[in-house]
Amino acid sequence: MNAPTLTSGGTALGAELLRHLDEQLASARRLLDTVLKQGQAIRDRDVDGVLARMADLQGEMERRAGLEQERARILTAAAANLGCPPHAVTLDAMASLLADHEALAARGRSAELRGLLEEIQREHTINRALMRQELAFLSHLTRMLGVESEEIGYRPPNEPGATMRATLDPAAAAPRARRVLDLEA
């Protein structure tokens, strides 16, 4: 096992790991903020807001891909010092390579990150349910207006060949007279 390099009371690996965890936390906070804003836009039926938040989510996910590459590099370096494969490296094993204060800080940041990711997942699940509910209402409304889903190019997301994009053909989507309540006797 190679001895970790020390830097002013800590290790190079510890400094790198803590910096990386700080970046992961900042990214997770941005994701949570975006997911919460998206949920509010869904509740407000603000289509432009929902789409803008989706773009924000995609951008943050692209940044997170870079963080995952950095994470893999850190795990590979720790694995080399521990004499095990990168996939077998745990935070507890990595802590043996760190100064005590670094290991304590890394455990705290890791716990905070796990909590944020759980909250993001929970809010994202709620947003998906809200979107399904809104799309079901839209589907019901178009049926009530006499417009069949095939005429507008929409299929619910759980159907094969589904699309979220509606392609309205004005001739095909012209509303037909339909009475919801027939009061004539």
Image (tube, rainbow, N blue to C red):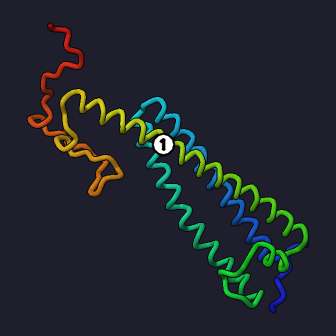
**Quarter where residue 83 is shown:** bottom right
The answer to whether residue 8 is seen in the rendering is no
- Tell me: residue 51, above or below residue 7: above
Taking the spot 60% from the left edge, 44% from the top edge, the residue there is: 33
Give the vertical position of 15 relative to 144 (above or below): below
Residue 73 in picture, x, y percent from top left: 64, 78
**What residue do we see at 75% from left, 62% from top?**
110
Going by the picture, which residue comes out furthest to the left?
A: 171
- The quarter of the displayed image where residue 170 is located: top left
Image x and y of residue 164, in percent: 31, 47
| Residue picked out by circle 1 | 129
Tell me: 54 left or right of 147.
right
Identify the residue at horizontal 59%, vertical 52% (top origin). 121
Please tell me whether mark 1 sits on a helix, a strand or a loop.
helix
Would you identify the image quadrant in which residue 7 lies?
bottom right
User: Which residue does the image show at 50% across and 61% down from the upper left?
Assistant: 62
Asked whether, in this view, residue 185 is left or right of residue 142, the answer is left
**Amino acid at pointer 1:** Ala
